[in-house]
Structure formats: C-alpha cells, structure tokens
Image: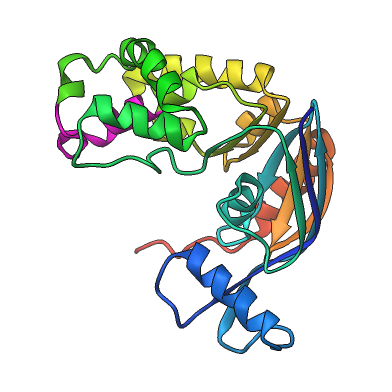
Amino acid sequence: MARLILDKATLDVPLHDSRSHSLQIALAKFLRRDGGAGRSSGSLRLLDGVDLVLRDGDRLGLVGGNGAGKTTLLRLLAGVYEPTSGRIHRVGKIASYTDLTLGMDLESCGWTNITLRCVFLGLTFAEAQALSPRIAEFSELGEALSRPVRTYSHGMVMRLAVAVAAAVRTDVVIIDEMIGAVDGAFLNKARQWFDFARSSARILVMASHDMSILRDYCSTIAWLDSGRIIELGPADQVLPRYERMRGRWPRPLQAA
C-alpha cells in the first residue's frame, strides 16, 4: 500500500538565508515555535495550503507556468522539504527523480557513484553493491565508470543516473522533466524504464511541459499557480483548459 496525503501543506522559505532549503525550513519552524505568528515579511511562500490525496494506482501530472510550484511540490512529496505549516503523510518507499544527480560525488568514479546514488534512493550498501554490475551494463559507460564523474559529459551523467533509476524498485515514483535531459542515443532505454516505472509503481507523480507525455502517462492533472492547486481533475478535462489558457499568455518579444 502507498499513500501521499497533504493537508493544508504550506511552505515558507526565509529570503535572507542563502543556505540549503532544508536548513531554511528548519529555521522557519524554530521561529514559529518561538512565538512568531504567521509569515514574516522576509519570507517567500512557495506552497500555499495544498490539499492532495494520492492512493495506489494514481498517476498524477503537474502543470503550471514557471514558478507555479511544480518542482517544489514534487520535492515536498518526496521528503526533500517538510511543510512549515499543515501536514504531510507518506506511506511506501519513495524514489524521487526531481534531480537525477542528487547524491552523486563528482570527484568520485562512476562505480562509487552507483553505490552513492542507490543508497540515496533507499537501498542498503549490500543491495547497491549487488546491483552495480547490472546498472553498469545498462548505462553503457564501460571503462568510463572508472573515471571521476566530473570528467563526464552531461549526457554521460544522465546515462548513469537513469541506469541507477532503472534498477531501483519503489512504491512511489516522482519525476520532474526527466526524459528531456537524456541524450538521443540513450533515449529509447530511458523511455523503456519510464514505461516500466509507470506500470510498476503504485503511485506516479510527474511534472512536464510536454502535454503529450502527460496525456500518455497521467490520468489526473493538478494545475498549479502561485503555489496553489487551482484545478484538480481528469487529464482529458484539465489539460485542454490549461492549454487554452496557456495560449493566451503573453509571448516574449521577438527581436526585429
């Protein structure tokens, strides 16, 4: 059984602190416990009173303009962030692909990073070691796995990240525009994994600007604006309305 439940989940981040969001959120919680009421003038509200319930079988797509809160919501669901007010309840093993390279060490070799990324996604060290040969074969990186990851091209890093993702089985899969980051020669393998992840995961949540991907993979759409879900419903109803609205947005001025 898998569940993701948000009850009035709100996320505020102090503007004056340039350190990690996790530390910022902890600071916000501390200030609130210390008697601070509401949101301070020095904070930014990234999510605002989000209610959401996801159960086994749900396939949710997120749409919205840049800065609408899609990636922030994905990270909240994955446990990267915690709400500063409201509640979130997570049941099941979660794999988040909002940042495919999160957990990697660019100074270490590909083999080491296979282990690091697997452990980051919730596997034990022994499980990661056992999966390493299969991940290496899937990545097609060969001898490059013995080199530091900092020497890799962007496409090679994505190959390594997708290969790890393909080997890890989880209840909840969270994806942010992943397929578009993969180079063309490896795209077919990435799509095969994506198809498997969709069919095997109990819950799938993804954000994409590609409406055809959302139609193919998601049965429900949440439309976000300014950190709020302004519409939630069947994909065949929400996506046409979103596309019509997106068509009315001002386009960037073209150079003469």
Magenta segment main secondary structure: helix
Estimate the x, y position of residue 127 in percent, counting from the top left.
45, 19
Color theme of the render: rainbow
Q: Is residue 53 above or below residue 59?
A: below
Q: How many marks?
A: 0
Estimate the x, y position of residue 19 in percent, counting from the top left.
40, 70
The boundaries of the magenta stretch are 147-161
Looking at the image, residue 66 sits to the left or right of residue 54; the answer is: left
Q: Quadrant of residue 128?
A: top left
Q: Quadrant of the C terminus?
A: bottom left
Estimate the x, y position of residue 222 in percent, counting from the top left.
75, 47
Residue 160 is a magenta residue: yes
Q: Quadrant of the N terminus?
A: top right
- Can residue 214 be seen by looking at this rendering? yes
Between 12 and 194, the one lying in front of the other is 12
Q: Residue at x 40, y 13 (%)?
A: 130
Q: Is residue 36 above or below residue 144?
A: below
Between 240 and 231, the one lying in front of the other is 231
- Can residue 183 be seen by looking at this rendering? no
Q: Residue at x 56, y 86 (%)?
A: 42
Q: Quadrant of residue 148?
A: top left
Between 198 and 126, the one lying in front of the other is 126
Residue 214 is a magenta residue: no
Q: Residue at x 81, y 49 (%)?
A: 52
Q: Is residue 2 above or below residue 196?
A: below
Q: Quadrant of residue 189?
A: top left
Q: Residue at x 16, y 23 (%)?
A: 146
Estimate the x, y position of residue 253 in percent, counting from the top left.
45, 65
Looking at the image, residue 62 sits to the left or right of residue 13; the answer is: right
